[in-house]
Image: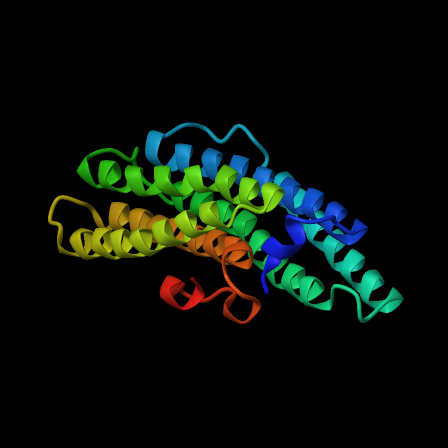
Amino acid sequence: MNLFNFLTGSRPPLVEQSMTDLGVMLDTADSMFAAATNCLLDNEPVHVDLAEQDDVINEREQKIRRSVLEHILADPRAELALSLLLVSIVQDAERLGDLAKSISKASALASSPRMGRHVEALRPIRDRVQSAFPRVRRSFIVGDAKVGRVVMDEHTQTKADVGGFLTELAAADDVTSNEAVVLSISARMIGRTSSHLSNIVSAVALPFDQVRNAPNWADND
């Protein structure tokens, strides 16, 4: 059983409200990630209040937790597995805001504008992760397990790409120590963002006992 089963049929009030709140969390984190990484890679000023946006995410997380608790207290037998899934998923969604703020803080450590081949090497990794946000949201709205699988497979590639980026950066002789610190921290935060998005969508793509684990599609087909 996975969240897909609940999303493709009639939705109880818990699902409807929680999906709305989770959608707000993902949309807000999407905006935060774009602002933070545009600052990192394109040296753009951060025009949004990341702390204020993170408060929106935190408030929605608390709202979902309250809804789940009220639902369980009212009828512990109904949609218990779904309630557990939502509590797990919302933890990952909440972390997205924190990671965006961490990327922005890493950029603030830079002593000079970010540019050059290492910035350009990180850009396609960022672009892949950025593109996952709306697809993760869509996966929940329509219960699209195929989209979830694509996002999870992309995360596997992102992990490898971040590792390769860090290996090359560590051996490079054309970066200052300041640049290396800023880019390595940011690359890790971008990779962690991808990980949390993959964890979220695993609730749609995987059975309940495998949620937040690396996929093994052969076992689930």
In the rendered view, tell whether residue 36 sits above or below residue 177. Answer: above
Seen in the image, is 98 located left or right of residue 5? Answer: left
200 horizontally vs 115: left or right: right
Q: Where's the N terminus, which quadrant?
A: bottom right
Could you tell me residue 112's position as x and y percent? 29, 35
Relative height, residue 35 to residue 155 (above, below): above
**Viewed as shown, does residue 16 lie left or right of 173?**
right
| Front residue of this view, candidates 46 and 26 | 26
Between residues 93 and 97, which one lies in front from this camera angle? 93
Q: Residue furthest right?
A: 74
At horizontal 13% and vertical 50% (from top left) the residue drawn is 172
Q: Residue 119 versus residue 147: which sits nearer the camera?
A: 147
Q: Total number of numbered labels?
A: 0
> Which residue is nearer to you in this view: 88 or 54?
88
Residue at 40% over, 68% down: 219
In the rendered image, the quadrant that contains the C terminus is bottom left
> Can residue 51 be seen at all in this image of the molecule?
no
What x and y, as percent, mark residue 164? 21, 54
| Residue at image location 29% in from the left, 35% down from the top | 114
Q: Residue furthest left?
A: 173
Where is 74 relative to 106, above or below? below
Q: Position of residue 211 (x, y in %)?
A: 52, 65
Expressed as whole percent of the image width and height from the top left, the position of residue 41 reads: 33, 35
Q: Is residue 168 visible?
A: yes
| Quarter occupied by residue 84 | bottom right
- Colouring of the image: rainbow
Q: What residue appears at the point 38 percent right and 65 percent down from the top-left corner?
A: 216
